[in-house]
Amino acid sequence: MTQPRSGVHYGPSFSRMRRTVLRTLAPHRKKTLPMTVPAHAAPRFLPGEKLALGLCFVFLLWANRVTPLWADDYCRTIPFSPRMIFHIVWGNYFFWTGRWFITLVTFFILDLHHYGSLVAFAVVNAGVFVFLVHVVVHMCRREAGHEPRPSARTGFVQCLLVFLMLWWLPRTIAEVALWKTGAIGYLWGVTGEMWILSRLLAGRARMNVAQYGAVFLIATAMESISLLMALFVLGWAAWAWKNSRPVPWALAVSHALGTFTLGVAPGNYMRARFMTPSTLPDRLDGLTGNLGSLFDPFWVPFVLLIGIGLFMGRRQLRFPACLRCGRGWMFAALALAYMLLLLIFPREALAARVSYPASVFLVCYLACLLFSCPVGAVFSKVMAVTCTGLAVMHLAIVIPDLTLLARISHDWAVSTQAQVARDQPVVLHKVTMGPRHKLLYVHKDIIFVGINPDPRNQLTMCYAWAMGASSVRAVP
Protein backbone atom coordinates (compact mmCIF):
# COMPACT_ATOMS: atom_id res chain seq x y z
CA MET A 1 0.00 0.00 0.00
CA THR A 2 1.42 3.35 -1.07
CA GLN A 3 1.94 5.86 1.69
CA PRO A 4 1.01 9.54 1.10
CA ARG A 5 3.84 12.08 0.93
CA SER A 6 2.40 13.97 3.81
CA GLY A 7 0.37 12.85 6.70
CA VAL A 8 -1.49 16.11 6.94
CA HIS A 9 -4.77 16.45 5.05
CA TYR A 10 -5.88 20.00 4.17
CA GLY A 11 -9.58 20.24 3.53
CA PRO A 12 -11.30 21.85 0.53
CA SER A 13 -11.71 25.11 2.44
CA PHE A 14 -7.93 25.51 2.69
CA SER A 15 -7.51 24.80 -1.04
CA ARG A 16 -9.98 27.53 -1.89
CA MET A 17 -8.20 29.94 0.45
CA ARG A 18 -4.84 29.04 -1.11
CA ARG A 19 -6.13 29.77 -4.64
CA THR A 20 -7.54 33.11 -3.44
CA VAL A 21 -4.21 34.15 -1.93
CA LEU A 22 -2.29 33.17 -5.08
CA ARG A 23 -4.68 35.15 -7.29
CA THR A 24 -4.21 38.16 -5.00
CA LEU A 25 -0.43 37.97 -5.09
CA ALA A 26 -0.13 37.14 -8.80
CA PRO A 27 -0.16 40.73 -10.13
CA HIS A 28 2.51 41.74 -7.63
CA ARG A 29 4.70 38.82 -8.61
CA LYS A 30 4.39 39.61 -12.30
CA LYS A 31 5.68 43.11 -11.75
CA THR A 32 9.02 41.73 -10.62
CA LEU A 33 9.49 39.54 -13.69
CA PRO A 34 11.30 40.94 -16.71
CA MET A 35 8.54 40.01 -19.19
CA THR A 36 9.68 42.42 -21.91
CA VAL A 37 12.88 44.21 -22.82
CA PRO A 38 12.46 47.96 -22.30
CA ALA A 39 12.98 50.27 -25.25
CA HIS A 40 16.02 51.89 -23.72
CA ALA A 41 17.78 48.49 -23.54
CA ALA A 42 18.27 48.55 -27.32
CA PRO A 43 21.90 48.85 -28.44
CA ARG A 44 23.12 52.42 -28.74
CA PHE A 45 24.79 51.69 -32.10
CA LEU A 46 24.05 49.07 -34.72
CA PRO A 47 26.84 46.96 -36.23
CA GLY A 48 28.69 49.06 -38.79
CA GLU A 49 26.94 52.27 -37.71
CA LYS A 50 29.91 53.85 -35.94
CA LEU A 51 32.10 53.59 -39.03
CA ALA A 52 29.38 55.02 -41.27
CA LEU A 53 28.68 57.92 -38.91
CA GLY A 54 32.41 58.59 -38.61
CA LEU A 55 32.77 58.91 -42.39
CA CYS A 56 29.71 61.17 -42.53
CA PHE A 57 31.17 63.36 -39.78
CA VAL A 58 34.49 63.76 -41.62
CA PHE A 59 32.72 64.83 -44.81
CA LEU A 60 30.34 67.20 -42.97
CA LEU A 61 33.20 68.76 -41.04
CA TRP A 62 35.01 69.52 -44.30
CA ALA A 63 31.81 70.83 -45.95
CA ASN A 64 31.08 73.17 -43.05
CA ARG A 65 34.64 74.46 -42.91
CA VAL A 66 34.83 75.21 -46.62
CA THR A 67 31.36 76.82 -46.90
CA PRO A 68 31.73 80.60 -46.57
CA LEU A 69 29.46 83.08 -44.85
CA TRP A 70 26.57 84.41 -46.90
CA ALA A 71 23.29 86.37 -46.64
CA ASP A 72 22.17 87.00 -43.04
CA ASP A 73 25.46 85.61 -41.72
CA TYR A 74 27.09 88.97 -42.37
CA CYS A 75 24.34 90.74 -40.39
CA ARG A 76 25.28 88.61 -37.37
CA THR A 77 29.00 89.42 -37.46
CA ILE A 78 28.79 92.65 -35.48
CA PRO A 79 31.55 93.36 -32.95
CA PHE A 80 30.94 91.19 -29.92
CA SER A 81 28.80 92.97 -27.33
CA PRO A 82 26.42 91.03 -25.03
CA ARG A 83 24.44 94.20 -24.38
CA MET A 84 23.97 94.83 -28.11
CA ILE A 85 23.12 91.18 -28.75
CA PHE A 86 20.37 91.09 -26.12
CA HIS A 87 19.09 94.44 -27.36
CA ILE A 88 18.77 93.13 -30.94
CA VAL A 89 17.21 89.82 -29.83
CA TRP A 90 14.70 91.69 -27.66
CA GLY A 91 13.86 93.98 -30.56
CA ASN A 92 13.46 91.06 -32.97
CA TYR A 93 11.08 89.25 -30.60
CA PHE A 94 8.80 92.27 -30.39
CA PHE A 95 9.17 93.67 -33.90
CA TRP A 96 10.30 90.96 -36.34
CA THR A 97 10.33 87.29 -35.26
CA GLY A 98 9.57 85.13 -32.25
CA ARG A 99 12.64 82.90 -32.69
CA TRP A 100 14.47 84.54 -29.82
CA PHE A 101 16.57 81.57 -28.69
CA ILE A 102 17.77 80.65 -32.19
CA THR A 103 18.56 84.30 -32.91
CA LEU A 104 20.49 84.57 -29.66
CA VAL A 105 22.55 81.46 -30.42
CA THR A 106 23.27 82.67 -33.96
CA PHE A 107 24.52 86.04 -32.75
CA PHE A 108 26.78 84.51 -30.12
CA ILE A 109 28.30 82.07 -32.60
CA LEU A 110 28.83 84.43 -35.53
CA ASP A 111 29.89 87.42 -33.43
CA LEU A 112 32.86 85.39 -32.23
CA HIS A 113 33.93 84.30 -35.72
CA HIS A 114 37.13 86.35 -35.44
CA TYR A 115 38.06 84.23 -32.40
CA GLY A 116 37.64 80.85 -34.04
CA SER A 117 33.98 80.22 -33.31
CA LEU A 118 33.38 79.08 -36.90
CA VAL A 119 35.65 76.12 -36.19
CA ALA A 120 33.45 75.26 -33.22
CA PHE A 121 30.37 75.79 -35.38
CA ALA A 122 31.70 73.38 -38.02
CA VAL A 123 32.25 70.68 -35.39
CA VAL A 124 28.87 71.21 -33.69
CA ASN A 125 26.92 71.48 -36.94
CA ALA A 126 28.52 68.32 -38.33
CA GLY A 127 27.71 66.58 -35.05
CA VAL A 128 24.07 67.72 -35.22
CA PHE A 129 23.67 66.30 -38.74
CA VAL A 130 25.28 63.01 -37.70
CA PHE A 131 22.99 62.87 -34.67
CA LEU A 132 19.99 63.34 -36.98
CA VAL A 133 21.16 60.37 -39.06
CA HIS A 134 21.54 58.31 -35.88
CA VAL A 135 18.06 59.24 -34.62
CA VAL A 136 16.40 58.51 -37.96
CA VAL A 137 18.14 55.13 -38.33
CA HIS A 138 17.15 53.86 -34.89
CA MET A 139 13.66 55.35 -34.85
CA CYS A 140 12.82 53.97 -38.29
CA ARG A 141 14.20 50.51 -37.59
CA ARG A 142 12.03 50.40 -34.47
CA GLU A 143 8.88 51.68 -36.16
CA ALA A 144 9.30 49.43 -39.21
CA GLY A 145 9.03 46.36 -36.96
CA HIS A 146 11.16 44.15 -34.80
CA GLU A 147 13.82 42.72 -37.08
CA PRO A 148 17.07 40.94 -36.21
CA ARG A 149 20.15 43.07 -35.90
CA PRO A 150 21.81 43.57 -39.28
CA SER A 151 25.28 42.43 -40.12
CA ALA A 152 28.06 45.01 -39.92
CA ARG A 153 28.07 45.36 -43.72
CA THR A 154 24.30 45.83 -43.93
CA GLY A 155 24.22 48.27 -41.00
CA PHE A 156 27.04 50.30 -42.57
CA VAL A 157 25.32 50.49 -45.97
CA GLN A 158 21.87 51.30 -44.53
CA CYS A 159 23.29 54.10 -42.39
CA LEU A 160 25.09 55.64 -45.37
CA LEU A 161 21.92 55.41 -47.46
CA VAL A 162 19.96 57.29 -44.79
CA PHE A 163 22.64 59.99 -44.75
CA LEU A 164 22.50 60.31 -48.55
CA MET A 165 18.71 60.55 -48.44
CA LEU A 166 18.86 63.28 -45.81
CA TRP A 167 21.34 65.17 -47.98
CA TRP A 168 19.86 64.74 -51.46
CA LEU A 169 16.09 64.61 -51.02
CA PRO A 170 15.67 68.12 -49.51
CA ARG A 171 16.38 70.41 -52.44
CA THR A 172 17.48 73.26 -50.17
CA ILE A 173 20.15 71.33 -48.29
CA ALA A 174 22.72 74.14 -48.43
CA GLU A 175 20.28 76.64 -46.96
CA VAL A 176 19.32 74.37 -44.06
CA ALA A 177 22.56 72.52 -43.34
CA LEU A 178 25.55 74.60 -44.52
CA TRP A 179 24.43 78.22 -44.40
CA LYS A 180 25.32 79.20 -40.83
CA THR A 181 22.14 81.13 -40.01
CA GLY A 182 19.98 78.59 -41.83
CA ALA A 183 21.58 75.55 -40.19
CA ILE A 184 21.05 76.90 -36.69
CA GLY A 185 17.48 77.87 -37.48
CA TYR A 186 16.39 74.78 -39.43
CA LEU A 187 18.73 71.80 -39.08
CA TRP A 188 19.15 72.20 -35.33
CA GLY A 189 15.46 72.80 -34.70
CA VAL A 190 14.29 69.87 -36.85
CA THR A 191 16.90 67.55 -35.31
CA GLY A 192 15.64 68.49 -31.85
CA GLU A 193 12.04 67.79 -32.82
CA MET A 194 13.01 64.41 -34.29
CA TRP A 195 14.80 63.57 -31.03
CA ILE A 196 11.62 64.38 -29.10
CA LEU A 197 9.51 62.32 -31.51
CA SER A 198 11.89 59.36 -31.25
CA ARG A 199 11.78 59.34 -27.45
CA LEU A 200 8.00 59.64 -27.46
CA LEU A 201 7.50 56.74 -29.87
CA ALA A 202 9.99 54.62 -27.92
CA GLY A 203 8.12 55.15 -24.64
CA ARG A 204 10.94 57.20 -23.11
CA ALA A 205 9.01 60.39 -22.46
CA ARG A 206 10.21 60.68 -18.85
CA MET A 207 13.15 63.08 -18.69
CA ASN A 208 15.15 65.09 -16.22
CA VAL A 209 14.79 68.82 -15.63
CA ALA A 210 17.56 69.77 -18.07
CA GLN A 211 15.97 67.70 -20.84
CA TYR A 212 12.57 69.29 -20.27
CA GLY A 213 14.31 72.67 -20.53
CA ALA A 214 15.84 71.53 -23.83
CA VAL A 215 12.38 70.50 -25.08
CA PHE A 216 11.10 74.00 -24.28
CA LEU A 217 13.96 75.66 -26.18
CA ILE A 218 13.63 73.29 -29.15
CA ALA A 219 9.95 74.23 -29.42
CA THR A 220 10.93 77.90 -29.81
CA ALA A 221 13.03 77.24 -32.94
CA MET A 222 10.58 77.14 -35.87
CA GLU A 223 6.88 78.00 -35.89
CA SER A 224 5.52 75.41 -38.33
CA ILE A 225 7.24 72.26 -37.05
CA SER A 226 6.83 73.41 -33.45
CA LEU A 227 3.06 73.74 -33.87
CA LEU A 228 2.75 70.35 -35.57
CA MET A 229 4.80 68.58 -32.91
CA ALA A 230 2.93 70.33 -30.09
CA LEU A 231 -0.36 69.04 -31.50
CA PHE A 232 1.14 65.56 -31.95
CA VAL A 233 2.53 65.40 -28.41
CA LEU A 234 -0.73 66.66 -26.89
CA GLY A 235 -2.70 64.15 -28.97
CA TRP A 236 -0.36 61.37 -27.85
CA ALA A 237 -0.84 62.39 -24.22
CA ALA A 238 -4.64 62.38 -24.61
CA TRP A 239 -4.51 58.94 -26.25
CA ALA A 240 -2.31 57.58 -23.44
CA TRP A 241 -4.68 58.99 -20.80
CA LYS A 242 -7.74 57.47 -22.49
CA ASN A 243 -6.06 54.05 -22.70
CA SER A 244 -4.78 54.13 -19.10
CA ARG A 245 -1.14 54.33 -20.11
CA PRO A 246 1.62 56.54 -18.68
CA VAL A 247 0.83 60.08 -19.81
CA PRO A 248 3.81 62.30 -20.83
CA TRP A 249 2.26 65.41 -19.31
CA ALA A 250 5.59 67.03 -18.44
CA LEU A 251 6.87 66.60 -21.99
CA ALA A 252 3.62 67.87 -23.47
CA VAL A 253 3.54 70.91 -21.18
CA SER A 254 7.22 71.76 -21.84
CA HIS A 255 6.74 71.61 -25.60
CA ALA A 256 3.42 73.47 -25.49
CA LEU A 257 4.98 76.29 -23.45
CA GLY A 258 7.80 76.64 -25.98
CA THR A 259 5.32 76.72 -28.87
CA PHE A 260 3.19 79.27 -27.03
CA THR A 261 6.21 81.50 -26.32
CA LEU A 262 7.13 81.37 -30.00
CA GLY A 263 3.61 81.86 -31.31
CA VAL A 264 2.58 84.85 -29.20
CA ALA A 265 5.69 86.89 -30.04
CA PRO A 266 4.54 90.37 -31.14
CA GLY A 267 7.23 90.32 -33.82
CA ASN A 268 5.36 87.62 -35.74
CA TYR A 269 2.36 89.87 -36.19
CA MET A 270 4.45 92.98 -36.86
CA ARG A 271 6.26 91.07 -39.61
CA ALA A 272 2.99 89.81 -41.08
CA ARG A 273 1.86 93.39 -41.64
CA PHE A 274 4.72 93.91 -44.09
CA MET A 275 3.76 90.82 -46.11
CA THR A 276 1.33 90.88 -49.00
CA PRO A 277 -2.08 89.57 -47.83
CA SER A 278 -3.02 86.29 -49.48
CA THR A 279 -6.36 84.52 -49.78
CA LEU A 280 -6.80 80.79 -49.22
CA PRO A 281 -6.72 79.97 -52.97
CA ASP A 282 -3.56 82.05 -53.29
CA ARG A 283 -1.96 80.21 -50.37
CA LEU A 284 -3.00 76.87 -51.85
CA ASP A 285 -1.39 77.83 -55.15
CA GLY A 286 1.79 78.81 -53.33
CA LEU A 287 1.78 75.55 -51.36
CA THR A 288 1.38 73.55 -54.58
CA GLY A 289 4.41 75.32 -55.99
CA ASN A 290 6.29 74.63 -52.78
CA LEU A 291 5.89 70.89 -53.36
CA GLY A 292 8.72 71.28 -55.86
CA SER A 293 11.00 71.53 -52.84
CA LEU A 294 10.04 67.96 -51.90
CA PHE A 295 10.20 65.99 -55.11
CA ASP A 296 12.94 66.14 -57.71
CA PRO A 297 14.94 63.65 -59.84
CA PHE A 298 17.22 62.72 -56.94
CA TRP A 299 14.38 60.66 -55.46
CA VAL A 300 14.60 58.19 -58.36
CA PRO A 301 17.62 56.02 -57.31
CA PHE A 302 16.41 55.69 -53.71
CA VAL A 303 12.84 54.79 -54.72
CA LEU A 304 14.18 52.28 -57.28
CA LEU A 305 16.40 50.63 -54.66
CA ILE A 306 13.52 50.30 -52.19
CA GLY A 307 11.22 49.08 -54.96
CA ILE A 308 13.73 46.34 -55.84
CA GLY A 309 13.89 45.29 -52.19
CA LEU A 310 10.11 45.12 -51.84
CA PHE A 311 9.81 43.19 -55.11
CA MET A 312 12.47 40.67 -54.11
CA GLY A 313 10.72 40.15 -50.76
CA ARG A 314 7.22 39.86 -52.24
CA ARG A 315 6.82 36.33 -50.88
CA GLN A 316 7.25 37.66 -47.36
CA LEU A 317 5.67 41.09 -47.85
CA ARG A 318 2.14 41.43 -49.15
CA PHE A 319 1.38 44.35 -51.41
CA PRO A 320 0.03 46.97 -50.69
CA ALA A 321 0.08 46.10 -46.97
CA CYS A 322 3.90 46.29 -47.02
CA LEU A 323 3.68 50.04 -47.70
CA ARG A 324 2.48 50.54 -44.13
CA CYS A 325 5.83 49.07 -42.92
CA GLY A 326 4.71 48.76 -39.30
CA ARG A 327 4.08 52.25 -37.99
CA GLY A 328 6.23 53.83 -40.67
CA TRP A 329 3.12 55.14 -42.49
CA MET A 330 2.87 57.66 -39.65
CA PHE A 331 5.85 59.62 -41.03
CA ALA A 332 4.18 60.03 -44.42
CA ALA A 333 1.06 61.23 -42.61
CA LEU A 334 3.14 63.74 -40.63
CA ALA A 335 4.71 65.06 -43.85
CA LEU A 336 1.25 65.58 -45.34
CA ALA A 337 -0.06 67.20 -42.16
CA TYR A 338 2.94 69.52 -42.05
CA MET A 339 2.45 70.72 -45.62
CA LEU A 340 -1.26 71.31 -45.01
CA LEU A 341 -0.39 73.23 -41.86
CA LEU A 342 1.57 75.70 -43.99
CA LEU A 343 -1.75 77.01 -45.32
CA ILE A 344 -2.07 79.16 -42.21
CA PHE A 345 0.98 81.18 -43.28
CA PRO A 346 0.92 83.89 -45.98
CA ARG A 347 2.20 82.83 -49.37
CA GLU A 348 5.12 85.23 -49.09
CA ALA A 349 6.37 83.31 -46.03
CA LEU A 350 6.60 80.00 -47.91
CA ALA A 351 10.31 79.97 -48.71
CA ALA A 352 11.56 76.70 -50.14
CA ARG A 353 13.50 75.90 -46.97
CA VAL A 354 10.26 75.95 -44.94
CA SER A 355 9.42 72.55 -46.46
CA TYR A 356 12.55 70.97 -44.92
CA PRO A 357 10.70 69.23 -42.02
CA ALA A 358 8.38 67.52 -44.51
CA SER A 359 11.44 66.30 -46.42
CA VAL A 360 12.83 64.76 -43.23
CA PHE A 361 9.51 63.03 -42.48
CA LEU A 362 9.47 61.58 -46.00
CA VAL A 363 13.06 60.39 -45.57
CA CYS A 364 11.91 58.63 -42.40
CA TYR A 365 9.14 56.89 -44.33
CA LEU A 366 11.56 55.76 -47.05
CA ALA A 367 13.97 54.56 -44.36
CA CYS A 368 11.18 52.47 -42.79
CA LEU A 369 10.49 50.91 -46.20
CA LEU A 370 14.21 50.23 -46.65
CA PHE A 371 14.51 48.56 -43.25
CA SER A 372 11.42 46.43 -43.88
CA CYS A 373 12.95 44.91 -47.05
CA PRO A 374 14.23 41.35 -46.41
CA VAL A 375 18.00 41.49 -46.78
CA GLY A 376 19.17 38.40 -48.59
CA ALA A 377 22.47 37.79 -50.33
CA VAL A 378 21.29 39.31 -53.63
CA PHE A 379 19.62 42.41 -52.19
CA SER A 380 22.62 42.97 -49.94
CA LYS A 381 24.81 43.18 -53.06
CA VAL A 382 22.29 45.49 -54.74
CA MET A 383 22.38 47.81 -51.72
CA ALA A 384 26.18 47.80 -51.62
CA VAL A 385 26.52 48.60 -55.34
CA THR A 386 23.84 51.32 -55.18
CA CYS A 387 25.34 52.89 -52.07
CA THR A 388 28.81 52.91 -53.63
CA GLY A 389 27.53 54.55 -56.81
CA LEU A 390 25.53 57.18 -54.92
CA ALA A 391 28.47 57.94 -52.63
CA VAL A 392 30.79 58.45 -55.60
CA MET A 393 28.19 60.70 -57.28
CA HIS A 394 27.81 62.61 -54.02
CA LEU A 395 31.51 63.35 -53.72
CA ALA A 396 31.93 64.07 -57.44
CA ILE A 397 29.26 66.79 -57.30
CA VAL A 398 29.61 68.27 -53.83
CA ILE A 399 33.38 68.63 -53.56
CA PRO A 400 33.86 70.67 -56.78
CA ASP A 401 30.84 72.88 -56.03
CA LEU A 402 31.83 73.70 -52.47
CA THR A 403 35.46 74.18 -53.47
CA LEU A 404 34.32 76.68 -56.10
CA LEU A 405 32.21 78.48 -53.49
CA ALA A 406 35.23 78.78 -51.22
CA ARG A 407 37.43 80.10 -54.05
CA ILE A 408 34.86 82.74 -55.06
CA SER A 409 34.48 83.81 -51.43
CA HIS A 410 38.26 84.14 -51.09
CA ASP A 411 38.56 86.17 -54.30
CA TRP A 412 35.78 88.51 -53.20
CA ALA A 413 37.36 88.98 -49.77
CA VAL A 414 40.77 89.78 -51.33
CA SER A 415 39.21 92.23 -53.79
CA THR A 416 37.16 93.88 -51.03
CA GLN A 417 40.19 94.30 -48.76
CA ALA A 418 42.23 95.80 -51.58
CA GLN A 419 39.54 98.36 -52.42
CA VAL A 420 38.96 99.18 -48.75
CA ALA A 421 42.72 99.81 -48.35
CA ARG A 422 42.47 102.37 -51.16
CA ASP A 423 39.45 103.93 -49.46
CA GLN A 424 37.21 103.19 -52.44
CA PRO A 425 33.57 102.06 -52.64
CA VAL A 426 33.72 98.31 -53.23
CA VAL A 427 32.55 96.96 -56.58
CA LEU A 428 32.36 93.16 -57.00
CA HIS A 429 31.53 91.10 -60.04
CA LYS A 430 28.35 89.05 -59.79
CA VAL A 431 29.20 85.36 -60.20
CA THR A 432 26.75 82.67 -61.28
CA MET A 433 27.06 78.90 -61.50
CA GLY A 434 24.13 78.13 -63.80
CA PRO A 435 21.20 75.72 -63.52
CA ARG A 436 23.15 72.78 -62.07
CA HIS A 437 24.02 74.74 -58.95
CA LYS A 438 20.50 76.14 -58.87
CA LEU A 439 19.16 72.60 -58.68
CA LEU A 440 21.57 71.27 -56.08
CA TYR A 441 22.26 73.92 -53.51
CA VAL A 442 20.93 77.38 -52.79
CA HIS A 443 18.78 77.37 -55.95
CA LYS A 444 19.82 80.89 -56.86
CA ASP A 445 22.06 81.95 -59.73
CA ILE A 446 23.76 84.44 -57.41
CA ILE A 447 25.76 82.39 -54.96
CA PHE A 448 26.08 84.84 -52.11
CA VAL A 449 22.66 86.28 -51.48
CA GLY A 450 22.97 89.84 -50.23
CA ILE A 451 25.55 91.17 -52.69
CA ASN A 452 23.45 92.88 -55.33
CA PRO A 453 23.51 96.08 -57.42
CA ASP A 454 21.73 98.10 -54.70
CA PRO A 455 24.32 99.29 -52.12
CA ARG A 456 21.47 100.37 -49.79
CA ASN A 457 20.00 96.85 -49.57
CA GLN A 458 20.08 95.63 -45.97
CA LEU A 459 22.07 92.47 -46.68
CA THR A 460 24.48 94.35 -48.92
CA MET A 461 25.02 96.86 -46.13
CA CYS A 462 25.64 93.99 -43.70
CA TYR A 463 28.34 92.61 -45.99
CA ALA A 464 29.94 96.06 -46.25
CA TRP A 465 29.79 96.46 -42.47
CA ALA A 466 31.36 93.04 -41.88
CA MET A 467 34.15 93.76 -44.37
CA GLY A 468 34.81 97.32 -43.16
CA ALA A 469 33.76 98.92 -46.44
CA SER A 470 31.85 102.19 -46.84
CA SER A 471 29.59 100.58 -49.49
CA VAL A 472 29.42 97.49 -51.67
CA ARG A 473 27.59 96.82 -54.91
CA ALA A 474 27.65 94.09 -57.53
CA VAL A 475 27.98 94.58 -61.26
CA PRO A 476 27.46 92.03 -64.08
Image (cartoon, rainbow, N blue to C red):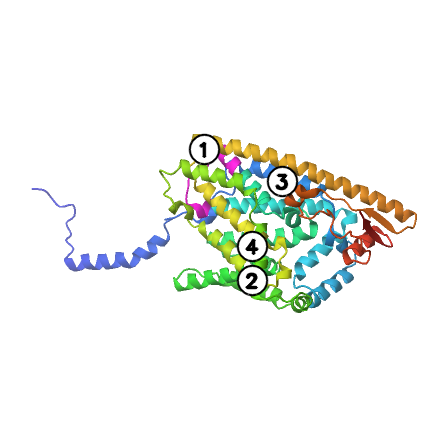
From the image, tell me which residue sits under label 1.
379
Q: From mark 1 to mark 4, how far is it between C-alphas?
A: 33 Å
Quick check: 469 left or right of 170? right
Examine the rendered structure and indicate whether residue 173 appears above or below residue 209: above
From the image, tell me which residue sits under label 4.
193
Q: Which circle, 3 or 1, is nearer the viewer? A: 1
Q: Main secondary structure of the magenta part?
A: helix
Q: From mark 1 to mark 2, how far is it between C-alphas?
A: 41 Å
Earlier in the chain: of badge 4 and badge 2, it is: 4
What type is the residue that disc 1 sits on?
Answer: Phe
Residue 344, x across and y down, in percent: 57, 64
Q: From mark 3 to mark 1, how far is it between C-alphas?
A: 27 Å
Tag shown at residue 210? none
Earlier in the chain: of badge 4 and badge 3, it is: 3
Q: From mark 4 to mark 3, how far is it between C-alphas?
A: 21 Å
Earlier in the chain: of badge 3 and badge 2, it is: 3
Tag shown at residue 57? 3
